[in-house]
Every structure is written in structure tokens, then in C-alpha cells.
Image: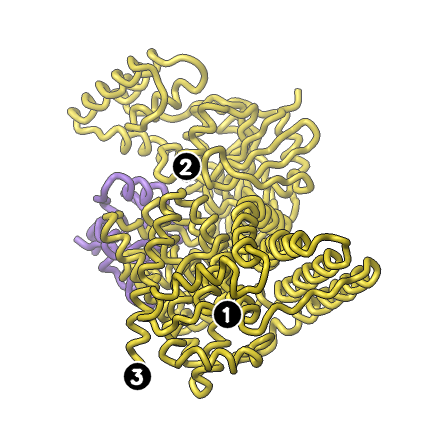
Chain colours: A purple, B yellow
Amino acid sequence: MRRLDELSPGEEGRIQRVSAPKGLLRRLFALGLRPGARVRLLRRAPLGDPLEVRVGESFVALRKHEAAGVVLEDER
Amino acid sequence: MSARRVALLGNPNTGKSTLINALAGAQLQVGNWPGTTVERLLAREGERTYVDLPGAYSLLATTPEEKIAVRSLLEDPPEVLLVVLDAGNLERSLPLLLEAGELGLPTVVALNLMDEARAKGYRLDPGALEAELGVPVVPVVASRGEGIKALKAALDRAAVPRSSLAYPPALERALRAIEAHLEGPARRARAALLLAGEDLPAPEEAREAARFARAALFELGLDPYLELTGAVFARARELFKRALKGHNPRPTLTDRIDRLVLHPVLGPVLFFLGMLFVFRFTFLFSAPWVTFIGRVQEVLAGWTQALPLPPLLASFFTGALVAGVGTVLAFTPVLFFLYLAMGFLETSGFLARSAFLTDRLMHAVGLSGRAFIPLVLGFGCNVPAIYATRTLESFGERLKTALAIPFMACSARLPVFALFAAVFFPERATYVVFGLYLLGLFFGLFTAWLVGKVAQTEPASGVMELPPYRWPPLRVLLAQARVRTRDFVQGATGPILIAMVLIWALLHLPPGPLEESLYARVAQTLSILFEPLGFSDWRLVGALIPGFVAKEVVVGALAVSFLGAEPAAGLGLLAGLHDLALAFLAALKETFGALFALFGLPRLGLEAGGSAPALAAPLSQVLTPRGALGYLVFVLLYTPCVATLAALAQELGRRWAAFSVAYQLTVAYLAALLASRLLP
């Protein structure tokens, strides 16, 4: 089980579930970060946090601890 | 029949303001949503009015903007709803359309940004969407005016979208149960909002039914929010597949720019240069007009002197009224150009990148990256910086940032710094001034941190979209900058005039020499307080009082009290007009010159111009370097100017504005006390 904040730049995965407080969850969903979506980590900010991810055609910035709630499916 | 009220609804960054500009840009009005600080664009064309709703991802609102959009749609439904989709990000923009479809309003869809969709390699079929939804779908490139005619024609064919959301049976039953207690339009949409747990005006029976249904669903292991949005997303995906005719993924310009702008090393460097450019832009273009307004003031004063008026009245005219209006006007060029720059940063996509780059840094003091640009703008002028806090998400975040901004050494404080640094620290003037800037920054960040700790504000979320880079429509930028500047003039003229009249009265009553005026007496009384800070000459203390109106006035006030006022010479009408014409031409010429200077190398170094050389001797007689340092630190920190206070009162309320004065006086006093102990 991998979390979104554990990906390296360039890696991607499919979202299995998102656990976050209500407001954050809704925002993540609205931006496309919801179960079933493929997400790719593009880069980390110069100081390591926040992260930029790509989901569909959206580019989304989120902090590490926020990305930690996004759990990815196992892939092999 | 022709629709009269058309509301534009769409995700943030789908080009709604560009579209409204393309539809009826000549009649563009910028205002606010009633009772809020969220900006509203409105445009008229004949009988028809276009309103731009705040950007929303969903009607299940999480941001203040989304709440405003939902309220407006429910309480004041438009005759036609124009849903703006991002063709280059279609799957993401469809859910809002589907949610809005439940409102039962006549709808038209603008499939905007078709050019970006093509650039990303998408081939789309608007006809397929039209057939599925049952409403007109018009492909548009708003920035180039493509498809606008067809869109306007389609507004007359607006239709209520076909409902096509398939909810699970349990959810469908719950919706019907709530709907039964609702009346009027948009029953289904309101039922869905209630079921998702939203708070909106509804009869008590409907609320009760919603509570009951929610509890029942949770018991079945169903989260109403997840189920509702799940149905919406599933349908959005289906629609997207129908509309998609092919996709050859291609890297876009945004990908390439971001590789540089967000680069770990290059990014911060480019960013620093970019901010430098913004400031040079602002000051190169505004400086000629500030000079021109100063000249207007002098000419008006000259005319007043030539009038047959009693001296006290003439002095009131020039010293209070003309000077007051002049102070307000002197702000406007700086504000206008800073607003222009800010609008550009905001709509071009750079603001979001700056937030991304600085978020970690700002997080250290409990702020989010979005607070960075407002703070930095504070170095230009505190007033637009405080208005810029509107882009922040929560009141707590705005409070922290707005209270920190007045500590940023705005450009008006530089003349004071330059004068004292040149006189008392000639060898190290640049370091002293630089140190003062850092000190201001330190206290600003400290304040933000402290307020966050005391008020226990939750840190704002770091989740935000990094929109594609786009050229903002110049006409919209100009209209926004004009209206924001006008708002400042309306809000600050009163307070500034009152302050100027009070200061004039202090200086000139009772009539006679300055040493016997109220001003001198007040300053003398206060000077005891400043003894420990190393300066107690009444003229130094006194200059702090007019400095409250605008910090740069401190130097002028010192010149008047040390060197005596230069009597304004009378000026004939024609000579005055001639002067004004020359000054206007000079300002125009300099503005054009600024176009070239903008790309030249910045001049470094300080200039203590004007009355500075003459002030050096009298100042060194009454002040030691120790006292000068205390004075500088005090001037840096002591209070927001009246214009900034007006902005604080407007954004945070009067109590917080009053708090900031008391707080800053305290901080300034303690810091100056400490600073004056640093030197022997």
C-alpha cells in the first residue's frame, strides 16, 4: 500500500481511497483526486513541500500531510 | 423572446471573465457581491445583462466563492444559465454542469478554450454533448472572439437540460422524500444539497426529512455526499467519452514554462527577478504621475495665494484641503499600477506558482503560500497589499496577513530612512536601510505567527489548482485596476482629509509662530515619552504626527519645523496653466521613457534628495546616531498610515484597525528602545 506523498517525481498510481476531513475531502474530489483516478507526482517544491500532482488535465498542489491521506492501489 | 439576465457559471480558470469581455466588454462593470469582498463582473448589452458568478467546482460548496454562487442561483435565479466548460479539461468541468442541470434553469453551454483543447491534442464533438444534454453546446475561443456570435444566438434557444443522473435506489427515495416538502423552483437541486448535509434556507419539514434520510443512509453504510457525487462523476465520465473523438497527448506551453518556473534552483531565481520586475514596472510608470500631482498641488497653492483671502483662510485652503486631496491623489498612480500588476499575476497563473514555491517558507509562521504576494506587495504600498489579502481563503488567514502587512517598509518610508541614514551613518547607509527592511519583515512575520497562536486559527489548506498560463484580457485588467483605485479614493478621502484638517489646526492654531502652536505644545508634552528612545527634540517628535497621514510627510514636516516653511508664491491663472501643461507633458514623456527603462538595469543606491542636505546640520545638532537609530526603528514600525487604516477597517472591521494602531505603537516603542541601546 502506497500513499501519494511517497511517490517519486514521475511516478504514478491509481487512487484507492481518500481519507481526509470533510472540507479537504470535498476539495480533493472536486479537483479530480478521487478513487479510481490515475495520479502522477510531477514535482516537489524547492523546499520539499508542497507537491504538484497531475490528475487528468488538472495540475494540483497539495501539502505532504494532505497527500498522505490519498492511498494508492497496489500495482505490480 | 430574448433572455435578459444571463449568469455565467464555471470552474475557476475557465476563462469566464474573458468570455464576459468577449460578449459585452464595452459595457463592463466591476463591483462586489453584496455584503462581500468577492469581486463581481457585470456587462450589459442592450436589454441583456451578463453576470459572472464566482468560480465554483461544485454546488456542494467548500469555499466562500462557491457559497455565493449557490446562493445567487437559488435565491435570484437568472433567466438563462450559461455554463462555461474548459474544453481542455472537459471531464473535470462536466460535474458542475450536471449539478447545475438539476436546478431546472434554461441552460446554454459554452465549450470554451477550444484552442487549448486542440493544443493538448483533443478532438471533441460538441454535437454529441448537445444530443446527450438537450441544451445548445457552442464551441468558443473567448480570447479570440471565436464562436461568440453563435453563442449569443444560442442564448435564445436555451433549454432545461435533460436529467440524466442515475442515483442508487435508496438515494433516489431519499431525494423524493425531501422534495415532497419543498416548493418552488429547483426542488430537486435543493433536495440534493440538503441530503448532502448543506445548510440552506428550507422549511423545517424538509430539513427534518433530510436529517432522517441522512441517518437512514449512513445506517446502510452509504455516505450521501459520496453517493451523490459518485453518480455525478460517473455520468460526467460517460459524457466525456461520448464527446471525445480522439486524443494525442502533447506537452503544452504550460508544461514547458513550469519546468523552468518551478525548477528547484532556477525557479526561485526567476521568481525573485519577476517580483523585481513588478516593482520596477509599478514605480517607473507611477513616479512621473506622482510628480505631476505634486506640481498640480503647488499650482493650486499658488493660485490660492494670489486670491484676496485672509492669510489664515488661504493657509487652510492650501495646507489642509489642497494638501489632503493631493495626498489622496498621490496614492492613485502607485495603486493603479500595483493593481494592474497584481491583476496580471492573479489571472496569468503566476500567483498560484508563487504560492507553490513559497508555501513551505510561509508555513513556518503559520501562513500559506498564497499570503506571500500580498506581503511582498506591502513593500510597494501597504494599501493594495491589504486589499490583495482578499485572495486568501479564510478570515483567519486574511487577519494574520493583513496585520503583518503594515510592518513591511513601504516605499513612502524610504525618504525618511534615506535622510537619516545619510546624515548619521554615511559610511553604512545602505546596510542600515537594508537592515530596516529586514526588521520590518521580521516583525511582520512574527505578528502573523503570534496572531495565529493567540487566535488559534486553523492553517489554510494547501490544496489549489495550478492553472495553465494565459494572457489576461487587458480590458478586464484595466477595468479592475480602475475600480479598485476608485474604491480606495472613495474610502480613504474622508479619513485623510479629516486627518489633514486636524494636523493643519495643530500647526496653525493659535495663529503665530510655529514654536507657540498647539503642534509644538503637543509634541513637547509627548517628547518626555521618547526620551528613553534617544530622541526628545519636539520637532522630531512632532513630525511623527503628520507621518500618520502618510509616512513620507515626516521629512517635509521636519523641514518645515527646522528650516521654516517656504512661503508659497502667488501664481497667476495663465502662468499656472502653463506650468500644469508643461508638467503634464513631462510626465507623459517620462512614462514613455519608462517603457525602455523597464528593461534596463535597476539603479542601485540611495538618494536623499529634496530638503535633505539642508536638514543635515540641524539634525545632527539635536540627535546622536543612537537617537537616530531609535527614530528610524520607530518610524518603520509605529503605525499604519491613515490610508492603510482605512483599508484595514474595510477588510477586517474597525476594531481590528484600532487594534493594529495600539499594537504597532507598542511594538515600535519597545523595538526602538532596544535599538537605541545597541549603540553606545
Q: Residue at x 57, y 60 (%)?
A: B334
Q: Nearer the viewer, mark 3 or mark 2?
A: 3
Q: Position of residue A35 (x, y in %)?
A: 27, 43
Q: Chain of mark 1?
A: B
Q: Chain of mark 2?
A: B
- Kindly identify which residue carries mark 1: B276
Mark 3 packing: few (<14 Cα in 10 Å), some, or many (20+)? few
* CA distance for labels 1 and 3: 37 Å
Kind of element beneath mark 1: helix
- Kindly identify which residue carries mark 3: B680
Residues at marks 1 and 2 on the same chain: yes
How many marks overall? 3
Amino acid type at circle 1 is Leu
Q: Name above or below for residue B172 compared with residue B236.
A: above
Kind of element beneath mark 3: loop
Q: Earlier in the sequence, mark 1 or mark 3?
A: 1
Q: Nearer the viewer, residue B264 or B123?
A: B264
Q: Residue B66: which numbered mark, if any?
A: 2
User: Disc 1, disc 2: CB below 8 Å?
Assistant: no
Q: Residue at x 62, y 43 (%)?
A: B21
